[in-house]
Amino acid sequence: LALLGYGVVVALAVVICFSLAEPIARVLGKTGINVMTRLMGLILAALAIEVMTGGLIKIFPILASPAIYP
């Protein structure tokens, strides 16, 4: 039952986003859309690096230990 409610909320959020896409695109214009696309790409790349780093630390725990230099 909780999953059904969660699915309805997600579907409603998607419908709202899609219905507001055209007005937002009109306000942003071509340049604004290009800027937002690049910004979202940068955020996505940062998240990907964070996930990859977490995975590598789980595989190789030595990477998380502080480096000891003589």
Image: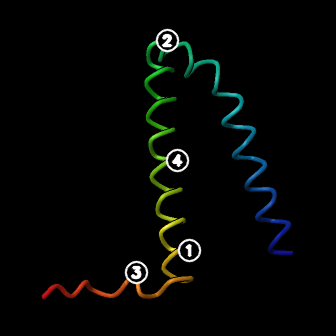
Image quadrant assignment for residue 58: bottom right
**Foreground: disc 4 or disc 1:** 1
Residue at the disc numbered 3: 63
Residue at the disc numbered 2: 29
Instruction: Locate residue 55 relative to residue 53 in the image: left or right.
Output: right
Residue at the disc numbered 4: 44
Mark 3: amino acid = Leu
Label 4 or label 1, whichever comes before in sequence order: 4
Task: Looking at the picture, tell me which residue is in the foreground, 41 or 69.
Answer: 69
Above or below for 62 versus 37 = below
The structure residue drawn at horizontal position 56% and vertical position 74%, both measured from the top left corner, is: 55
Label 2 or label 1, whichever comes before in sequence order: 2
Residue at the disc numbered 1: 55
The structure residue drawn at horizontal position 87% and vertical position 75%, both measured from the top left corner, is: 1
Task: Specify the color scheme.
Answer: rainbow
Label 3 or label 2, whichever comes before in sequence order: 2
Q: Secondary structure at mark 3?
A: helix
Around disc 2, counting alpha carbons within 10 Å, would you say few (fewer than 14), some (14 to 19), or many (20 or more)? few
Q: Position of residue 60 (x, y in %)?
A: 50, 83
Mark 2: amino acid = Gly
Q: Position of residue 67 (x, y in %)?
A: 25, 83
Q: In the rendered structure, are the residues bearing label 2 and label 1 in contact, judged by CB atoms less than 8 Å apart?
A: no
